[in-house]
Amino acid sequence: MKKLYISDLDQTLLDENAQLSEKQKEKLNNLINKGVLFTVASARSVKSIQQILKGVDFKLPVIEFNGAFISDFHTGKHLVINDLEKSLVAAILKMAEEFKKPPIFSVFGKNDYLFFPSVTNGGIEWYRNDRINSEDPRFMPDEYSFSEKNDHNIVCLNFIDKKEALEPLFKKISNAPFADKLSIHFLENRYSPGWYWLTVYAHNAQKHIAINELIKYAGIQDYELVVFGDNLNDLSMFNIADRSYAISNGVQKLKDVATGVIGHHNNGAVIDFIFEEEKKRNAELS
């Protein structure tokens, strides 16, 4: 039986600088071009994934924004879209106003855009600078402001602040009567320690749902699902996988439910694991 390998990106497939070495890319391409089924499921956008994994010859679509999109890696075209209902966005923004927490809007229409509020803390500043330095084509300069009246569809609302400052808003949204229509994540940004991200997506924007959609879209049959991750937003795909592996630098709650724990993300643990698995499988078939 063939294996379908799906890996998280940050702190899992990528090193501490959010990169994949050319040597690791070459190793991954060798696996893919030999017919190994591999793709990624990330909280990043496809534009960011394209920049980081430039040169990887993906045959399968990638899962971006924690499952809000399933997209073609090479063209960036969204094949599956799970956006937020406009009525839910309005309700969440009303809550956010109470706490004076304007979000970062990730939207799509004819193009994908990223609208930032005024920079009010170091966490927002870090993210804004990171997108500018990465030359993210979604980034909208300060003279462009987001308007609910425009024709954009919203895929993610992202609030950034210290944990204690965001927790009340997190609790209010989580306890709202419409919370079951949302997918909510509240995690520390490991590249900017001390700053937390509260991200809100549509309910179907979850990795396990996106994986099932990807399998149907790609027509994959007779497979064993093997996944890799490091944090709680990977938990849903761990729950549906035949086997799941946490990275040694991952959070303990994920390790507790994993099939096993493999090496450190800085040492190329995911690709090395797949390489050894396929080497063993080929030896058994020969």
Image: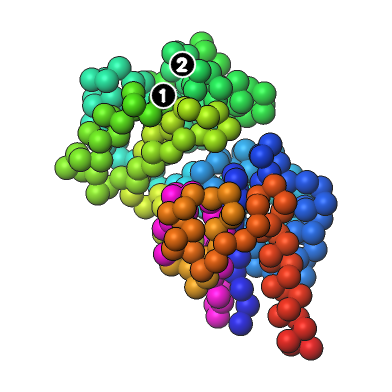
The answer to the question of whether label 1 and label 2 lie on touching residues, with beta carbons closer than 8 A, is yes
Q: Is residue 60 above or below residue 46?
A: below
Using the rendered image of the protein, determine whether residue 218 is visible from the camera's viewpoint: no
* Residue type of the residue flagged with mark 2: Asn
Q: Nearer the viewer, residue 255 or 178?
A: 255
The residue indicated by pointer 2 is 121
**Image point 49% across, 21% down: which residue?**
124
**Which residues make up the magenta segment?**
212-239
Q: Position of residue 113 (x, y in %)?
A: 51, 29
Disc 2: CA contacts within 10 A as few (<14), some (14-19) or many (>=20): few
Q: Tell me the quarter of the image containing the N terminus.
A: bottom right
Q: Position of residue 274 (x, y in %)?
A: 69, 66
The kind of secondary structure element at disc 1 is strand
* Residue type of the residue flagged with mark 1: Asp
**Residue 138: quarter of image:** top right
Q: Position of residue 85 (x, y in %)?
A: 30, 40
The kind of secondary structure element at disc 2 is loop
Q: Position of residue 130 (x, y in %)?
A: 61, 25
**Image point 63% across, 22% down: which residue?**
132
Instruction: Reply yes or no: does residue 237 show up in magenta.
Output: yes
**Taking 84 as reference, is 134 left or right?**
right
Q: Is residue 132 above or below residue 222?
A: above
Numbered label attached to residue 161 = 1
